[in-house]
Amino acid sequence: MKQWTSKDIKTLRKKYKLTQKALSVLLGVTEHYIYYLERGIRKPSKSFKLLIDCIEEKLKKKGGE
């Protein structure tokens, strides 16, 4: 499991051209939560890290990487 920093989350979102809203829908969290994570106001939970790992894998496969 990756340790997902605020920079990592923002980088992933930008890499796949997702808005905060789009990423929040994929992850089943609020847009505000993504905003707080990207700014380092909140730290991702273990469950969130596992979920975003899965989403990253799906995005890689979809994008052909």
Image (spheres, helix red, strand yellow):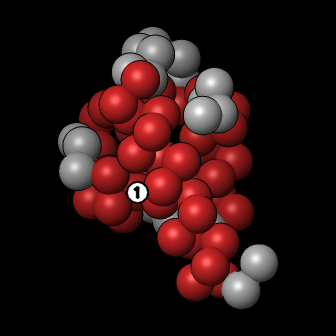
Residue at horizontal 45 percent and vertical 39 percent from the top: 50
Residue at horizontal 33 percent and vertical 61 percent from the top: 26
Local SS, label 1 = helix
Q: Which of 32 and 28 is in front in this view?
A: 28
Q: Which of 6 and 56 is in front in this view?
A: 56
Question: Is residue 2 rendered to the left or right of residue 28?
Answer: right
Residue at horizontal 77 percent and vertical 78 percent from the top: 65
Give the residue type that dot 1 points to. Answer: Leu
Question: Is residue 44 rendered to the left or right of residue 5?
Answer: left
Q: Position of residue 58 (x, y in %)?
A: 52, 70
Q: Could you tell me if residue 40 is visible in this image?
A: yes
Dot 1 corresponds to which residue? Answer: 23
Residue at horizontal 46 percent and vertical 16 percent from the top: 43
Give the answer, above or below, for where 38 lies relative to 59. above
Q: Nearer the viewer, residue 47 or 32?
A: 47
Q: Position of residue 57 (x, y in %)?
A: 58, 63
Question: Is residue 30 rendered to the left or right of residue 40?
Answer: left
Total numbered badges shown on the rendered structure: 1
Q: Position of residue 52 (x, y in %)?
A: 47, 47
